[in-house]
Image (spheres, helix red, strand yellow):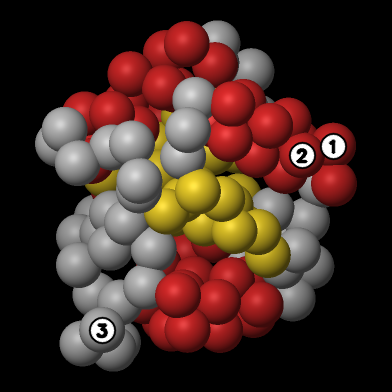
Amino acid sequence: MALILIVDDNDEFRGMIADYFGELGYRIAMAMNGAEGLARARELKPDLIICDVMMPDVGGIEVLRGLQAEDDTRSIPVLVMTGTFFDKQMSELFRQESNCREFMSKTTELAYVQKKVESLLGGAGK
């Protein structure tokens, strides 16, 4: 079973994603902010990270760069989700980071997010 780390400061969203993917059989770990997310990623080495953009301490772009700075976390694929206004420039900024594999709005249907997660995990999913 693949391990998904959810890094988001919004309790409701984090819980919703955790419940959805947990019910599909994925193992779930959570972090309430970017600093905790980096620490958990180093500790757990998840198969995939779902990360928010705007967080109070360490934001999504810093999380991506922090992951890339270490050999053990550099290759973990990250699906970035934002609740802020979804704009093309922000998407392009994040996509320049090699570990950002997808960038999407938090309003995206969960079934579509599931398809992206399955694709990123390359069949190593559940």
What residue is pinned by disc 1?
12
Residue 72, numbered circle: 3
Q: Quadrant of the C terminus?
A: top left
Does 61 sit above or below residue 94?
below
Does 110 sit above or below residue 95?
above
Q: Depth check: 98 or 85 in front?
A: 98
Q: Residue at 50% of width from left, 48% of height from top?
A: 27
Whichever of callouts 3 and 2 sits on the residue coming sooner in the sequence is 2
Q: Is residue 37 left or right of residue 83?
A: left
Q: Is residue 124 left or right of residue 33?
A: left
The amino acid type of the residue labelled 2 equals Gly
Q: CA distance from mark 1 to mark 3?
A: 30 Å
Q: CA distance from mark 1 to mark 2?
A: 5 Å
- Disc 1 is placed on an element classified as helix
Q: Residue at 85% of width from left, 46% of height from top?
A: 11
Work out whether residue 94 can be spotted.
no
What residue is pinned by disc 2?
15
Mark 2 Cα-neighbour bin, 10 Å: few <14, some 14–19, many ≥20: few
